[in-house]
Amino acid sequence: MLKARVIPVLLLHDNGLVKTRRFTDPVYVGDPVNAVKIFNLKEVDELIFLDINASKLNKEPDYELISDIAKEAFMPFGYGGGINKISQIRKLLRIGVEKIIINTALSDEHFVREAVATFGSSTIVASIDIDQESIYVHTKKKKQHCKLLEYVRKIEELGVGEIMVNSVERDGMYVGYNIPLLLQIASAVNLPVIGCGGARNIDDVKELITHTECQAAAAGSMFVFYGKFKAVLITYPEESELLNLGVS
C-alpha cells in the first residue's frame, strides 16, 4: 500500500491562482508559477491543479500556462479542467503533467475507458464533487441525484486509478473533512481515494488518514492562507509533522 499523501490543491482562474468557498466567490491568491517555486522549496511530494472555468466555458486547457508550471515543478502534478478528448490528454502528458483529472467528462464512459486503455489507469484520476450526498455537476449548475456508493463503484469499473472526492459544502469553510462520507466511499471501492474539502490544519489531515481508508488528504485553504485574517501565505507541513502523521 502506498504511504498516505498530503496534497495541495491549487485552483486556476484566468491565469492566476484563486481560492473558493463552497465552489463560489473565487479570491485571487497569487501567481501559479511562483507558488510552484515555493512548494519546491518546501519539498512537496505532489500537487494538483484544477482550472475551475475550463469545463464551464467549454475551453481547452491553458497549455502555455501548464507548460510554464511543468518547467518549474520539481514534483509530479495532476491537472484537471476542460478535458474531454484523448488528444488533450496526450498533449498534457507531453507537456509534463503526470496525472489527468477528469470530472465533467466522467459522464462519457467511452471516453474514460479509452483514456484508461490508452494511457494506463495510474494516469487517470476521477474527480467527483459531492454536495451533502448528491453528486454535484457544477458545470450544469445542478445536482445529479443518484445513489452515491453505486456511483463511485460505477466509476471504479471504468478502470480509473484513483478517485478524488471534493466536498462542495465544506470547500474553504475550515470545518474539517466529511469523515463519515469519506469513510463510506473509501470502504466501498478498491482504489486509492483522495479526500478534499474543509481541512483547517494538520490535525484534520491526521483524522482523515487515521479514521478512513483514504490514501491521500488534499486541501487548498490551509496551504495558501495563514492566521485568523487569512493572509495569503504559501505553506506546507514540516517534515517532522508529516512523520508524526506516518505519511513521510
Image: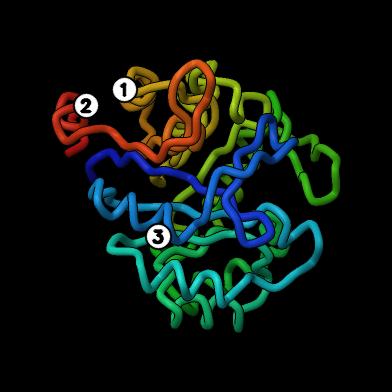
Query: Which of the pair 128/107 is nearer the observer?
Result: 128
Residue type highlighted by circle 3: Phe
Q: Residues within 10 Å of mark 1 (few under 14, many from 20)?
A: some
- Contact between marks 3 and 2 (CB within 8 A): the answer is no
Residue 188 in sight in this render: no
Q: Quadrant of residue 3?
A: top left
Q: Residue at x 65, y 68 (%)?
A: 83
Query: Which of the pair 156/72 is nearer the observer?
Result: 72
Q: Residue at x 46, y 72 (%)?
A: 68
Q: Residues within 10 Å of mark 3 (few under 14, many from 20)?
A: many
Residue 206: which disc? 1
Q: Residue at x 49, y 57 (%)?
A: 32
- Compared to residue 141, the image places residue 123 above or below, namely below
Q: CA distance from mark 1 to mark 3?
A: 22 Å
Label 2: which secondary element:
helix
Q: Earlier in the sequence, mark 2 or mark 1?
A: 1
Query: Which of the pair 107/57 is nearer the observer?
Result: 57
The residue pinned by badge 3 equals: 77
Q: Position of residue 168 (x, y in %)?
A: 66, 32
- Compared to residue 214, the image places residue 174 above or below, namely above
Q: Residues within 10 Å of mark 2 (few under 14, many from 20)?
A: some
Q: Position of residue 237 (x, y in %)?
A: 27, 33
Residue type highlighted by circle 1: Lys
